[in-house]
Image: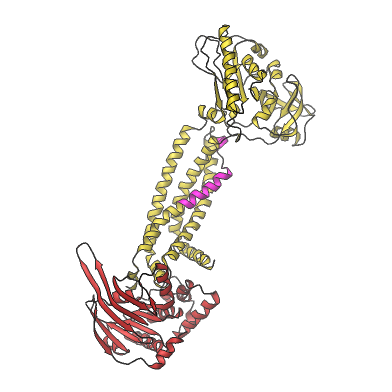
Chain colours: A yellow, B red
Amino acid sequence: MEMFTYYVQLCIRNFKRTPLFFALIMLTLSIGIGTLLANLSMLSLMSQDPIPGKSDQIFSVNMNTYAGANNTFGSMHTIRYSDAKAIVDAGVANRATMHYATNVYSRRADSQDLTRYSSATRATTASFFAMMGAEFAFGEAWKNEHSNNIVIGHELNIKLFGGENSVGEQLELQGQIYNIVGVLKPWIMKPLFYHATEGRAFNKTDDIFVPIEVAIDNNWAIHARALSTDDYTTLSETRQVNAYYIQAFVELVDAQQKLAFQTFIDGHAQQLQEKGNHRHEVDNRLYDVNDWLEYNEVVNKDLLAFTFATGLFLLVCIFNANSLMLSRYQAGQFESNLRRAVGASRKQVFYQGVIESVILGITCALVSLVLAISLLALYRQLFEDLAPVAELPLHMVVIGFGVALTSSLLSTIYPLVQGARTPLASILK
Amino acid sequence: MLSMKNISRVYRSDTIQTHALRDFNLQVEAGEFVAVTGPSGSGKSTFLNVAGLLDDFNEGEYILDGTSVNGLSDDDLSRLRNEKIGFIFQNYNLIPDYSIYDNVDMPLRYRGLSAKQRRSRIEHALELVGLASRHAYLPSQLSGGQQQRVAIARALAGEPKILLADEPTGNLDSLMARQIMDLLKEINKKGSTIIMVTHDPDQAREVNRNIQIIDGQITDYSIYAPVSKAQTANQETLSI
């Protein structure tokens, strides 16, 4: 311990002896690490598993039941109400849900204030919550798919009810009164795999969840990609016509259940084709969560390339720091040799250098974190698309420290080894 | 104290092989003050490097204070250097931005001594060389002779068995050289074994024994003053 303290003292002396030199090395490494860290953080958030433990059991259902003559889309993730309803009602999957995105204006029904908040809304089934891992802070999901019962998210509950238990309270949505039966706990899902298309993979989870049957009955507009081969004037007509706007997800616990479900939807599509409901080859596909995210290219390819480039940039920074350190150790060779001449072993001189390198690495890590946070803030200002993922998650802070220490050690190990090999005899002259 | 038998040190390059030391034999007793002389390139420095465990040798046997150094690891050699040898360099080799105190402290740091033990030894060593009051000075604030005294204090602080001095007065004017020489003789009288490389024949005559090295071999022994029994006895209790 005493030697460790001595090495730290020597390190501080060395820093004081050549402050500009060490500042240059620190900045060289920190800029490289900070830039890489910022990009890695975004990549990390883009490529993380949004629902660990269940991601290989939840599947996006894609079907080719397009009724038009030419289907250039192949298997589609937006399907008809009738197909989605058949999937949910079949009971083949462990759990099944269907949903579409909409948007409503909300206010407390008992509020004197007429301010209404634009609220991202998911029209879905009660099974949605358990399947997606959304936990309730208060209450539960609705029991009746045709009731005016809704679930609200944590943020809206704070906005409208100050975070109190609002179960039993009422909201006015699009001029109608809805009863709150459940309030979710804070729910962050990145990427938002249940709506990974149309560049929404990094949107927040929704503010309001409403029974899909009610949303359709009330003609709540579709806020997502929609296709239709038939005309319709109200959304309730889509229960019968060929309008493709609903996403279906199923939970299949094992390969056997997956096979059973695949057989079911293939059979369903085949029957419809034979009845002349659609005219295309049966091509139904199931994508598990990570495959679905990959299929939708949620990880920004430009960012991937840029991160690779910043990795190379860091290597250049390390080489630069390495050559600086090499010249520094050559300049400091006299002192190292003198220490060895009076009794320090190679190991001790080496450890002293390693301690210096570790302290330099820690300093670099701190500066890198500040740089990375600043860069991410800049990204949020400059690139709207990247804003939702321009954050520094905790695990990246740990990785940042690791990268900084590794970079610092890589910069100093070679000069240290070279220094330890120098013949001692020269010191006498 | 120091025994070298048939030591050879050969430097090899692609085309040239140089025998810096060949069949080198030397026995130095405890308490001796030995001067090593010889022309430039004769092997004096190589001898001092080998004796100080700063350089390897190719053949022969070297025993330092009862320990054979043949085949020792770097850790063992470092420990021997630290515990048994004190170096005094021609250029003093002080770290310029360390205080006198810290310069003397340096070898003791690697000895594993407590802070109290180190302080006691440093103060004692600086007192011995007459610089106790200047412990906070930087080397640049001292004269050449004073800097060499600091180097001697650094060598003595470790309570070594043997002091190796490489032209310790080579960079000093005659007055300062005289003072350093007197100091070394005084230290020797207290029992320290000293081997000193010098170009000055007068200095060589002041010590117990002078050996002359030419072409890597000892060519002449001149004994001027045998080691007294008192010096030998002091060697056993040399502690400053």
Asked whether residue A417 appears in the rendered view, the answer is yes
Asked whether residue A119 appears in the rendered view, the answer is no
Q: Is A398 included in the stretch rendered in magenta?
A: yes
How many tags in the picture?
0
Bounds of the magenta segment:
A387-406
Q: Nearer the viewer, residue A25 or B110?
A: B110
Which residue is painted at 28% across and 80% down in the image? B25
Furthest residue in direction left, as rendered: B15
Q: Nearer the viewer, residue A229 or A162?
A: A229
Q: Is residue A8 above or below residue A132?
A: below
Whole-percent x, y for residue A248 in the image: 61, 22
Assign the N terminus of chain B to one quadrant of the image. Answer: bottom left
Furthest residue in direction front, as rendered: A256
Whole-percent x, y for residue B147 in the image: 40, 78
Q: Is residue A54 above or below residue B66?
A: above
Q: Quadrant of residue B217?
A: bottom left
Q: Is B106 included in the stretch rendered in magenta?
A: no
Left or right: B89, with A307 as reference point: left
Whole-percent x, y for residue A289 in the image: 57, 29
Furthest residue in direction top, as rendered: A276
Left or right: B94, with A119 as reference point: left
Secondary structure predominantly adopted by residues drawn in magenta: helix
Whole-percent x, y for residue A355 in the image: 48, 60
Q: Quadrant of residue A278?
A: top right
Q: Nearer the viewer, residue B130 or B108?
A: B108
Q: Is residue B17 above or below residue B51?
A: above
Left or right: A128, with B117 as reference point: right
Which residue is painted at 28% across and 88% down in the image? B202
